[in-house]
């Protein structure tokens, strides 16, 4: 428990989160009642949604209505099986994901029921395809139109596509200006470079 605020750190798995309802619940690793996670608390962390089974750390407070998250400390995507979320992502892309730069972007539109949408990277005119399974593997349940995010992007068989989605705050953490390196044609370089 933190002395100044009376908040305590809790870790657990997201039981479910519904962005439309504006809340969800976390199963506390230490047992006891589930922890309410409100959309406003999630937005303060820079996210509009979180995927079920994501591992989270939150500061909680006890209220008359039960235990509620007051602040999100961290979110880790659901444990994967090591396989790419979609066939267009080569296993080598997954293995070398961290070598791809995070690019700041906004969601142009996204329809969860259709299973895809598009984003625009700042300073780059071409749309980036975003598949729902990539979104889920990245720890998001849904994306809102206009939402600021970061993307790791590859050149797919039909154009640019997101290989990973990350929260906007990660752009601040990864301030590597090499993310904006232009190739000889003045276009952003989206090619995957795999170590041999």
Image: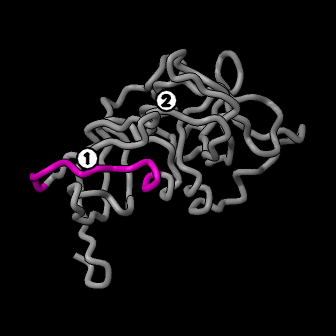
Q: Secondary structure at mark 1?
A: strand
Identify the residue at image location x=70%, y=51%: 179
Identify the residue at image location x=66%, y=16%: 157
For the record, the magenta segment spans: 30-42
As drawn, the residue found furthest toward the front would be 64
Q: Is residue 49 within the magenta segment?
A: no
For residue 26, which numbered disc appears in the image? Answer: 1
Q: Position of residue 103 (x, y in %)?
A: 67, 46
Earlier-in-chain disc, 1 versus 2: 1
- Tell me the CA gap for discs 1 and 2: 22 Å
Q: Position of residue 88 (x, y in %)?
A: 54, 19
Mark 2, other Cα within 10 Å: few <14 / some 14–19 / many ≥20: many
Left or right of 101 in this view: 37: left
Say which quarter of the image contains residue 81.
top left
Q: Is residue 37 within the magenta segment?
A: yes
Q: Position of residue 115 (x, y in %)?
A: 52, 18
As drawn, the residue found furthest toward the left would be 31
For the residues carrying marks 1 and 2, which lies nearer the camera in this image? 1
Q: Is residue 7 above or below residue 86?
A: below
Left or right of 129 in this view: 137: left
For residue 134, which numbered disc appears in the image? Answer: 2
Question: Is the Cβ of the residue at disc 1 closer than 8 Å to that at disc 2?
Answer: no
Identify the residue at image location x=55%, y=56%: 170
Q: How many marks?
A: 2
Left or right of 181 in this view: 34: left
Q: Position of residue 63 (x, y in %)?
A: 24, 63
Say which quarter of the image contains residue 122.
top right
């Amino acid at each position: 428990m933190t002395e100044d605020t009376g908040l305590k750190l809790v870790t657990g798995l997201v039981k479910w989160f519904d962005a439309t309802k504006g809340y969800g619940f976390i199963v506390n690793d230490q047992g006891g009642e589930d922890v309410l996670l409100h959309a406003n608390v999630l937005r303060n962390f820079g996210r509009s949604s979180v995927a079920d089974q994501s591992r989270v750390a939150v500061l909680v407070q006890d209220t008359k209505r039960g235990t509620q998250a007051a602040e999100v400390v961290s979110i880790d995507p659901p444990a994967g099986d090591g396989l790419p979320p979609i066939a267009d992502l080569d296993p080598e892309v997954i293995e070398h994901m961290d070598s791809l730069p995070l690019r700041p972007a906004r969601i142009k539109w996204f329809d969860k029921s259709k299973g895809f949408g598009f984003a625009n990277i700042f300073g780059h005119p071409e749309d980036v395809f975003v598949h729902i399974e990539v979104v889920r593997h990245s720890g998001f349940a849904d994306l809102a139109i206009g939402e600021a995010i970061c993307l790791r992007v590859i050149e797919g068989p039909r154009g640019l596509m997101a290989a990973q989605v990350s929260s906007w705050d990660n752009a601040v953490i990864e301030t590597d200006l090499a993310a904006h390196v232009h190739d000889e044609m003045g276009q952003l370089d989206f090619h995957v470079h795999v170590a041999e």
